[in-house]
């Protein structure tokens, strides 16, 4: 039996449709940890529209007592203890780590290749859970980036102790690079959304995360750069919703990132920077990788007097307007002064806790040594 030309066309068409039907699995995941970050990423459409991205919530059961928010049980990992821990060591003494890891394994699958986590480390439960979470992700071979909201020096010694200990444990285990963000700087930040609305408060974190997720493979790239160059800590600088008509040039937009830093750090001590530029697609000839690298290099030399290795990536969107977003992640800067200032605030308090045997002295000495630059 011979096939007619119409039959052949039909078979070819069916084959094309079959080839086009591929399973869509979410290869990226975002995990928020703790009470503060339950308010993050609530209003973004990305997590409703992007089938290749999952959003999970990790939190203590009592975190929901005063929150009016629904979380799908399939997308949350909830821990419970007799009372809500105030300190990182309370959580770690009262939670079953094996049970927690088993709950994570029921949510995070092999196809989640890249995982971004978001946490406020001033909280007892989140600061205690966070190192365990990243140890689990590291054991599973995930490419990860931790976005850490760090308490300001104006916060309590309790909050600073929790953050210091949690970051120290992650640094010792070297499970993930961390993007450090000062909570006070976030709450004081005022910018502009690319649609023109005012951008402030926790919305700044949402905006930053969306910008980073706009770049396919971003988490993987930062993770690999961190491992290859031995960089554990990054800090962000932002310029959002900048009109090229108003600012006249990309160089002028770069200057804006210096006005409201989200972390206090010395850029002259940095070992590399990663630059993301998001612009309308009709600016693709103006924002090639080569042109961005040239402008950033000249800006660093002329404005800051430094020459730092860099990775520059453009992101183009099909939209009208002339607004440009710039994210600069500064990596490898000297963190010793930052952590020494924090340690001065918490030293007396931590010594009291050690005298009462509330946590392991050997572990605490290792944390101090790593963060204060006393040990490699």
Image (cartoon, rainbow, N blue to C red):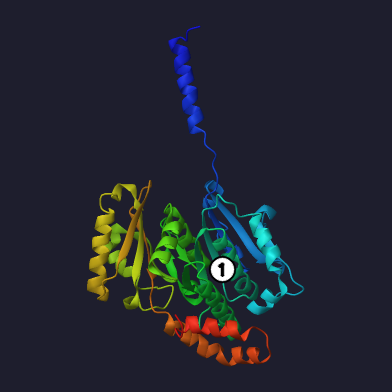
The picture quadrant where one finds residue 93 is bottom right
Q: Position of residue 84 (x, y in %)?
A: 71, 74
Residue at (41% x, 78% y) in the render: 264
Furthest-right residue in view?
A: 82
Where, quadrant-wise, is the C terminus in this rendering?
bottom left
Q: Nearer the viewer, residue 370 or 222?
A: 370
How many numbered discs, if any? 1
Q: Is residue 139 above or below residue 122?
A: above
Q: Secondary structure at mark 1?
A: strand
Residue at which label 1 appears: 119
Q: Position of residue 234 (x, y in %)?
A: 42, 70
Q: Position of residue 88 (x, y in %)?
A: 63, 77
Residue at (63% x, 70% y) in the render: 129
Q: Is residue 215 above or below residue 127?
A: above
Instruction: Let me know if residue 10 appears in the view.
Output: yes
Q: Nearer the viewer, residue 19 or 206?
A: 19
Q: Nearer the viewer, residue 88 or 252?
A: 88
The picture quadrant where one finds residue 329 is bottom left
């Amino acid at each position: 039996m011979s096939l007619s030309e119409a039959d052949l066309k039909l078979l070819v068409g069916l084959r094309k449709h079959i080839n086009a039907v591929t399973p869509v699995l979410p290869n990226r995941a975002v995990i928020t940890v703790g009470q503060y970050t339950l308010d993050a990423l609530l209003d973004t459409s990305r997590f409703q529209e992007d089938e290749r991205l999952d959003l999970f919530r990790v939190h203590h059961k009592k975190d929901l007592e005063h929150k009016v928010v629904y979380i799908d049980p399939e997308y949350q990992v909830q821990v419970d203890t007799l009372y809500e821990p105030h300190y990182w060591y309370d959580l770690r003494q009262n939670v079953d780590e094996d049970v927690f890891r088993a709950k994570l394994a029921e949510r995070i699958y092999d196809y989640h290749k890249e995982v971004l986590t978001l946490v406020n480390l001033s909280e007892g439960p989140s600061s205690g859970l966070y190192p365990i979470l990243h140890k689990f992700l590291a054991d599973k071979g995930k490419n990860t980036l931790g976005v850490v909201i760090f308490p300001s020096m104006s916060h309590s010694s309790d909050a600073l102790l929790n953050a210091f200990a949690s970051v120290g444990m992650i640094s010792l285990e070297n499970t993930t690079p961390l993007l450090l963000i000062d909570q006070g700087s976030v709450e004081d930040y005022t910018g502009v959304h690319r649609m023109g609305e005012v951008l402030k408060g926790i919305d700044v974190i949402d905006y930053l995360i969306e910008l980073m997720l706009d770049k396919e493979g971003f988490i993987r790239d930062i993770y690999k750069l961190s491992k290859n160059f031995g960089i554990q800590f990054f800090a962000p600088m932002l310029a959002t919703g900048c009109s090229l008509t108003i600012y006249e040039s990309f160089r002028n937009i770069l200057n804006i990132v210096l006005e409201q830093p989200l972390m206090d750090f010395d850029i002259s001590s940095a070992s590399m920077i990663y630059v993301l530029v998001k612009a309308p697609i009709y600016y693709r000839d103006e924002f090639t990788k080569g042109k961005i690298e040239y402008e950033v290099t000249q800006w660093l030399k002329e404005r800051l007097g430094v020459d730092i290795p860099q990775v520059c990536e453009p992101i183009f969107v099909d939209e009208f307007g002339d607004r440009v977003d710039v994210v600069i992640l500064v990596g490898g800067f000297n963190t010793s002064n930052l952590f020494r200032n924090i340690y001065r605030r918490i030293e007396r308090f931590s010594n009291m806790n050690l005298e009462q045997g509330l946590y392991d002295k050997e572990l605490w000495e290792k944390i101090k040594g790593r963060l204060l630059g006393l040990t490699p």
